[in-house]
Image: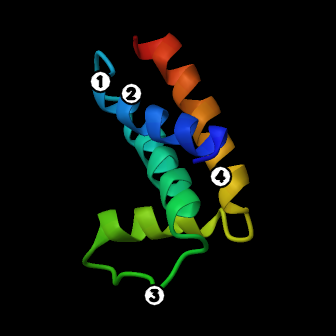
Amino acid sequence: MSDLQTQFETAAEEVQHLSRRPDDQTMLKLYALYKQATTGDVQGNRPGFMDMAGRFKYDAWAKLKGTTKEAAMQQYVDFVGQLKVKYG
């Protein structure tokens, strides 16, 4: 397992143990970076108007289209590091 992969998996675990839940925009960014890192570019159709949470998630992920999995992993690791400082 690569060093970046190990850091990514550690960050994904650590984010679950923050002292408080980040705001919705931060959660969307975490979701999008995680999906880009684990799945790649957004897949499927954009959810309909009745699924606003799904639309927000889809849109956040779609903004990362073209970002490599490795770049998304590094951004996720860096972002979680910032959140650990902010939220403990």
Q: What's under tag 3, amino acid-wise?
A: Gly
Tell me the residue that label 3 is attached to: 44
Tell me the residue that label 2 is attached to: 14
Indicate which disc, 1 or 4, sits on the residue closer to the N terminus. Answer: 1
Indicate which disc, 2 or 4, sits on the residue closer to the N terminus. Answer: 2
- Is the residue marked by circle 3 packed among few (<14), some (14-19), or many (20+) residues within 10 Å? few
Tell me the residue that label 4 is attached to: 72
* Residue drawn at point x = 58 percent, y = 45 percent: 5
Q: CA distance from mark 3 to mark 1?
A: 31 Å
Q: Is residue 5 left or right of residue 9?
A: right
Q: CA distance from mark 3 to mark 4?
A: 20 Å
* Proximity of marks 1 and 2: CB atoms separated by less than 8 Å: yes
- Is the residue marked by circle 4 packed among few (<14), some (14-19), or many (20+) residues within 10 Å? many
Q: Residue furthest left?
A: 50
- Measuring from the top left, give residue 60's x and y in whole percent: 53, 60
* Residue drawn at point x = 51 percent, y = 62 percent: 38
- Is the residue marked by circle 1 packed among few (<14), some (14-19), or many (20+) residues within 10 Å? few
Q: CA distance from mark 1 to mark 4?
A: 21 Å
Tell me the residue that label 1 is attached to: 17
Q: Is residue 63 left or right of residue 14?
A: right
Q: What's under tag 1, amino acid-wise?
A: His
* Residue drawn at point x = 52 percent, y = 67 percent: 59
